[in-house]
Amino acid sequence: MKRVVCDTNVILSGMLWNGAPRQVLARIEQGKHNLFTSRVLLEELDRVLRYSKFITIFGKAGLGRRDVLRWMVRNSTIVMAKPLDRPVVLADPSDDCVLACAVSASAEAVVSGDKHLLAIHSFRGIPILTTGRFLAVR
């Protein structure tokens, strides 16, 4: 069972569409992996879910912001993520919160579709993987 941190884009994609992101979330629901998140990541998810385009998209799927947040709280462990000592994702420093959560959770993988995070490949020994690669590695 792997300890994982999923970026917001993986959560949103997995909730909305079939494919690799949904398979990652299904494995978490089945207890095959332990999902970790942080207050900062939950706040980011909440903020993104308030964007009008996501209100519309999730509404068409029969889901609301609270449904997604409840899923996260029910299926993840919230850690107190210690901020990183220095910026790591220079192209988008806001992505550092994902890495901070992964380090604090002693994660075995970060799962993301974010090009800035994926460009790093790994951080402190934690691989940063696409959903497809994560599913292939098991």
Image (tube, rainbow, N blue to C red):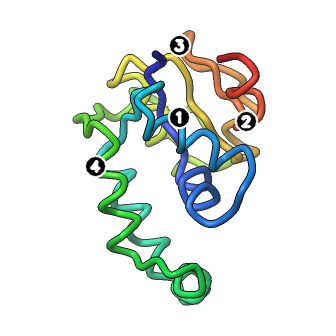
The three-letter code of the residue at mark 3 reads Arg
Where disc 4 sits, the SS reads helix
In the image, residue 39 lies at what x, y percent?
27, 50
- First-in-chain label (3 vs 2): 3
Where disc 1 sits, the SS reads helix
Image point 76% across, 22% down: which residue? 136
In the image, residue 112 lies at what x, y percent?
64, 41
- First-in-chain label (1 vs 3): 1
Q: Residue 74 got which mark?
A: 4
Circle 2 is placed at which residue position? Answer: 130
- First-in-chain label (4 vs 2): 4
Circle 1 is placed at which residue position? Answer: 27
Measured in 3D between alpha carbons, the distance from the residue under mark 1 to the one under mark 4, in whole angstroms, is 14 Å
Label 3 environment density (alpha carbons within 10 Å; few <14, some 14–19, many ≥20)? few
Circle 3 is placed at which residue position? Answer: 124
Label 1 environment density (alpha carbons within 10 Å; few <14, some 14–19, many ≥20)? some
- First-in-chain label (1 vs 4): 1
Residue 42 appears left or right of 78? right
Where disc 3 sits, the SS reads loop
Measured in 3D between alpha carbons, the distance from the residue under mark 1 to the one under mark 3, in whole angstroms, is 25 Å
* Direction left: furthest residue: 80
